[in-house]
Every structure is written in structure tokens, then in C-alpha cells.
């Protein structure tokens, strides 16, 4: 009897040791998995996880777990919609990796992509959190920004400055303002193209910086409105609107009195007085009407 | 003397007790085997639980990745075949995790955290501030939406001109323009405050003579090495939405010093770079102590 017990005990002990090793290994693997992609199991998520993993409590039905989780997901969808609308930034993906975790310090790596109007971006950064008693300090480092857009020259020096100082918040404040100003330009261009289709054309599309004005009967004479949005290194966004003229030499020789030479400066004072929309509109009117009378007088 | 002897007696007694117990044990061998069995069983359960969790995690991760792919390439809306096999509950869990992460990302990039207030008449907006990668204070304000937009309770410092920002930003029609403008003011203030803190911490030989709560005026005292001339430097941040001064002014008894190219350079350095960085450069160049 005793012998038997001893054998059984030994067998059991060996089994326990084996199981302990297996459990330890699995725990390690679970921790590794959590590092690669972090999920937060709280509230309904915890219940759902327990359900899926087989800890089915008596009386808990799948429908119940699903409907509770569904309600929470719906709430989150609504929150995200509101957040997107309010921030003017739409995020499409965010992945988190935990690089280091101790009781006082935690370093996580984030990769976030999305778009701000038509500006696609992907940013990577690390966030370190130090706990000191009640307080905790969070810092951003290793900021890396990739932006997919046509005109990047205006953002270049700003972006390198932001990467250097890891100023993530400034990056998004500026991107948003930049996009807002580009959107202003786009709407203005579109508005004028629709209002004066015979005079206004947008050779680079309505998102480009250039709008050209020319009278249909004078194909050689073109006025270009160059509207760029400049971003300073510290994140200041300023629209710059300039007028460029393209008039054939011969025309200038024939009509030396035409106020073409001073047009660019005159346009700047018009801008200061009237603001961009009204200044551009008066220019369009000038191109449309005055050229019209000129054409008729020439024909006579 | 009593101590060790009494300890010895107690020690002996406890030893006897242990012996007695071990003698008593064999009569109940089943309980030990049972205990081991129960332990083994508990461990087996734990193992199965972990295996299930790891498997769930793996399938969630897979689902999550395909969700991320779907949202970045919206044109590929065709769902993969394997999706139909995975249960609805896993799909929901993956979406839940994705949404939680996206909301967290909005928070990290300094998005306005909007929460509806309980009476649902308005919203509560949280605004994060950060400077050079360090998250600083967060400010909150309640905005009533009905019948007209009105700012309710808030913890924005009184020297930030909230009302005039609201008027300028045309808050009634464009709440985001108002929030953007307010956020610029708050972040610039946080930045200037942080710069001042760094100057005090890192530049002990530079004396901060004067500063105000808005950190829009800063008077510093420099000492020129060797000659020990004193230079007073006034930084005027009259644009409160910026972290750089609009005017830099030096005062010194030695007029020639200020006319020298080095000090002309220092002036432009202080207008173009944050003050703590400019001071580091000036110290390195040997212009100040």
C-alpha cells in the first residue's frame, strides 16, 4: 500500500513539475505576444475573453456577451466619429508595441497612420512613462514622420524641426492648420472656376497652387495666381498669394501703357485692402471686362 | 542566560512536534496523493486556460491586422474568406481593440478629448499641452451647446484671454477654430513656462531677474567671461501664441561690446531659437558664463 502510494506520489510530482514548466513557458509566450500587439482586457472585453477561453460561467449565454460587447463597440464608434470630426484628423490604424516594462518605467512604440484632408501621413514614435510617487511623466522620443503629398517643399524644414524636437502635438496642430488653409484655397479656386468658367482655369487641378486667368479671345495673355501655404520652422502657417503675368513681348511693345509692370505690387495692396477672395474676384472681373473692351476696340 | 536555554527547550519541543506529525502522516496517505492530484488538476486547467488565451490572442492579432489593412486601403473592401469562419464575438473583440487604440492615438497626438456632459446640454473638452516631447498640463473646459455656445466651468489660467479668443475665433459658427486658437495660446504658454524652467535648472550662472505669470516677459542677467561685464537681456514675447520672442534687447555699460558681431549674432540667435538652447550655444561660444 505504502509502496504504491510512493510510486503514485512520485508520478504525480513529476507530472506537476512538467506542468509547472509548461505553464511557465506559456506565460512567457503570452508576455511576448502582448509586447508585439497590446490588447487591453477590461470590462466587457474581459468578459468576452473569459467566455471565448472557456471559462463559461453558469447562465452566461453567448448572445448576452455579444450584445454587451456590441453596445460598447457602438459607443466607441460614436466616440471615434466625434473625435475625428473635432480634431480634423482621421486615424486609420494604430499599433502598439511594448519595448520595456518595469514597475517604474514603461516604453511603448506607436505607429499611427491616417489622413488630414487629403494629406496622408504615417508617424512613428516612442512614449516613455516614468512613475515617481503620485506623479508620472510622459515623454515622446524617436519621432519619425512620413507624409505623402504633392507639395512638400513648404513642409520640409518644419518637419525636420519637429522630428528633431519630438514635438508630436505641434506636428498635428500645424498639419491641421496647414490643411485648413489649403482647403480654403481649394474652395476659393473651385468657387471662381464655377462662377467664371470662361476665364478661370485650374491647370493643376483644384488642389494645386496655381489658378490661371485669361480671356478666351486672348490666348497669349495669361495672369497666374500663385497661392502657396507656407509653414515656418516653428509651425506658423501663412498663405502667400502672388500675381504673375505672362504677356507676349509684342503685345507689351504695342501697348506700353498697360499697367502690367506694376500689376504684382498693385495686387498686393488689393489683397491687403480687400482680402484674398475679393481681390481675386476683382482681378477676374478686370481680366474679363477690360480685355473685352480692348478686343472690340482693336477689331475696329 | 535564560534566553538561550529557554530557546533550546522550545526548539526541542517543536522538533518533537514535527516528529510526532511526521509519524502521524503515514496513516493518511490518500490526503497527500489527493493534494497532489488536485494540484496537477489545477495546473492542467491553468495550462489549458493559457493555451486558449494565447490562441485567442493570435486570432485577435490576425483579425486586427486585417482590420487595419482594410481601413488603410479602403478600396479593398472585400473581406477575406477566413473572416466568415471566425466567430462574431472575436470580430467584435478585434474591432473593440482597434477602436480603443485609435481613440488612445487621438489622445496622444493632442486631439481634443470630447466627452458629453451628463445633462447632454454640452461637452467637456480636454486640451493637452506639450513642449519638445514632454507632455505638460492638461486643461479642461465645459462648453454648453444649447441654446448658444457658452463656456462654462474651466481650469484655464485667468491670464489667458479666453473671452477675446472666443470672440476672435468666431466661436458660434466654428468651434474648432476657437479650440485651435485656444490650444495655440495654451501650448505656447506651456512652452514658454517649460523654457523658463529649463533655463533655471540648466543655466545656473544666468540669473533670471524678472518674469511674469504668462511668461511673456523675461529679463535675464548674463556675465561676460574674463572681463566680468554684466549684460541685461530682455526677451519680449508679445505674440502670445509663440514660444519665441518678438523682441530681444541687451543693456550693458560697455556699448562697444553690444556692437560687436558676436553680440549681434547672439541677438538673432535668441530671436530664432528657444532661449534655453540659445543660452547653451552662447555658453559654448564663450560669450557668457
Image (cartoon, grey):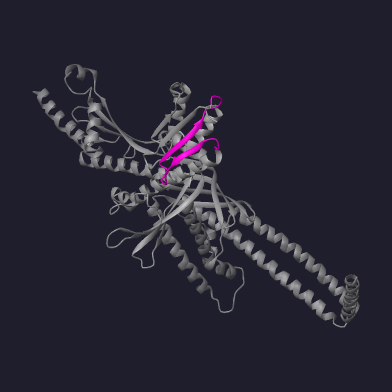
Q: Is residue A220 left or right of residue B225?
A: left
Viewer can see residue B74: no
Q: Position of residue B138 (x, y in %)?
A: 45, 53
Residue B200, given in percent of the width and then of the height, sits at 52, 41
* Nearer to the camera, A126 or B138: B138
Residue B108 seen from this side: yes
Q: Is residue A202 left or right of residue A115?
A: left
User: Looking at the image, which residue sits at the far top?
Assistant: A253
The residue that appears at 72% across and 72% down in the rendered structure is B42
Residue B206 falls inside the magenta stretch: yes
> Does A46 appear in magenta?
no
Number of numbered discs overlaid on the protein picture: 0
What residue is shown at x 54% (from left), y 54% (from top)? B65
Q: Residue at 59% of width from left, 69% of height from top?
A: A50
Q: Residue at x 38, y 43 (%)?
A: B241
A287 or B169, which is in the foreground? B169
- Span colored in magenta: B203-227
- Quarter where residue B27 is shown: bottom right
Indicate left or right for B34 with B130 as reference: right
Give the quarter of the figure containing the C terminus of chain B: top right
Amino acid at each position: 500500500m505504502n509502496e504504491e502510494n510512493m510510486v503514485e506520489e512520485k508520478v504525480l510530482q513529476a507530472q506537476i513539475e512538467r506542468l509547472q514548466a509548461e505553464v511557465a513557458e506559456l506565460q512567457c509566450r503570452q508576455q511576448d505576444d502582448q509586447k508585439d500587439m497590446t490588447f487591453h482586457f477590461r470590462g466587457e472585453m474581459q468578459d468576452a475573453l473569459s467566455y471565448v477561453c472557456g471559462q463559461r460561467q453558469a447562465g452566461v449565454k453567448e448572445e448576452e456577451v455579444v450584445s454587451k460587447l456590441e453596445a460598447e463597440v457602438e459607443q466607441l464608434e460614436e466616440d471615434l466619429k466625434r473625435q475625428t470630426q473635432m480634431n480634423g484628423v482621421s486615424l486609420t490604424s494604430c499599433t502598439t508595441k511594448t519595448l520595456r516594462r518595469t514597475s517604474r518605467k514603461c516604453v511603448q512604440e506607436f505607429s499611427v497612420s491616417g489622413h488630414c484632408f487629403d494629406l496622408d501621413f504615417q508617424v512613428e514614435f516612442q512614449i516613455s512613462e516614468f512613475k515617481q510617487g503620485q506623479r508620472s511623466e510622459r515623454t515622446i522620443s524617436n519621432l519619425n514622420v512620413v507624409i505623402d503629398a504633392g507639395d512638400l517643399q513648404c513642409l520640409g524644414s518644419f518637419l525636420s524641426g519637429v522630428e528633431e524636437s519630438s514635438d508630436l502635438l505641434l506636428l498635428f496642430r500645424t498639419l491641421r492648420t496647414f490643411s485648413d488653409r489649403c482647403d480654403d484655397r481649394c474652395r476659393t479656386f473651385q468657387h471662381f472656376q464655377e462662377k467664371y468658367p470662361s476665364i478661370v482655369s485650374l491647370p493643376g487641378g483644384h488642389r494645386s497652387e496655381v489658378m490661371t486667368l485669361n480671356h478666351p479671345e486672348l490666348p497669349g495673355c495669361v495672369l497666374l495666381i500663385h497661392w502657396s501655404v507656407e509653414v515656418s520652422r516653428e509651425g506658423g502657417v501663412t498663405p502667400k498669394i502672388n500675381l504673375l503675368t505672362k504677356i507676349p513681348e509684342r503685345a507689351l511693345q504695342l501697348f506700353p501703357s498697360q499697367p502690367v509692370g506694376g500689376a504684382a505690387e498693385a495686387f498686393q495692396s488689393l489683397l491687403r485692402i480687400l482680402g484674398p477672395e475679393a481681390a481675386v474676384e476683382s482681378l477676374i472681373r478686370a481680366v474679363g471686362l477690360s480685355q473685352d473692351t480692348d478686343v472690340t476696340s482693336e477689331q475696329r | 542566560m535564560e534566553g538561550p536555554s529557554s530557546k533550546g527547550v522550545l526548539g526541542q519541543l517543536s522538533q518533537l512536534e514535527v516528529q510526532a506529525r511526521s509519524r502521524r502522516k503515514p496513516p493518511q496517505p490518500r490526503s497527500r496523493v489527493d493534494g497532489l492530484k488536485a494540484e496537477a488538476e489545477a495546473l492542467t486547467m491553468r495550462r489549458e486556460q493559457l493555451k486558449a488565451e494565447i490562441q485567442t490572442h493570435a486570432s485577435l492579432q490576425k483579425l486586427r491586422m486585417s482590420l487595419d489593412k482594410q481601413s488603410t486601403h479602403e478600396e479593398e473592401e472585400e473581406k477575406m474568406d477566413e473572416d466568415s469562419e471566425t466567430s462574431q464575438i472575436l470580430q467584435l473583440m478585434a474591432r473593440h481593440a482597434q477602436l480603443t487604440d485609435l481613440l488612445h492615438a487621438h489622445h496622444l497626438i493632442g486631439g481634443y478629448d470630447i466627452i458629453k456632459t451628463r445633462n447632454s446640454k454640452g461637452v467637456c473638452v480636454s486640451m493637452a499641452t506639450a513642449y519638445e516631447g514632454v507632455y505638460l498640463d492638461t486643461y479642461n473646459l465645459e462648453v454648453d451647446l444649447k441654446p448658444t455656445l457658452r463656456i462654462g466651468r474651466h481650469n484655464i489660467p485667468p491670464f489667458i484671454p479666453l473671452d477675446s479668443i472666443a470672440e476672435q475665433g468666431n466661436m458660434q459658427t466654428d468651434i474648432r477654430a476657437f479650440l485651435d486658437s485656444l490650444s495655440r495660446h495654451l501650448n505656447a504658454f506651456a512652452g514658454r513656462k517649460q523654457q523658463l524652467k529649463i533655463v533655471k535648472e540648466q543655466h545656473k550662472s544666468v540669473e533670471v531677474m524678472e518674469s511674469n505669470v504668462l511668461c511673456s516677459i523675461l529679463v535675464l542677467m548674463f556675465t561676460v567671461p574674463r572681463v566680468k561685464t554684466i549684460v541685461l537681456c530682455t526677451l519680449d514675447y508679445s505674440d502670445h501664441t509663440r514660444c519665441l520672442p518678438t523682441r530681444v534687447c541687451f543693456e550693458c555699460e560697455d556699448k562697444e561690446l553690444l556692437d560687436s558681431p558676436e553680440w549681434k549674432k547672439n541677438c538673432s540667435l535668441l530671436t530664432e531659437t528657444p532661449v534655453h538652447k540659445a543660452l547653451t550655444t552662447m555658453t559654448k561660444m564663450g560669450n557668457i558664463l
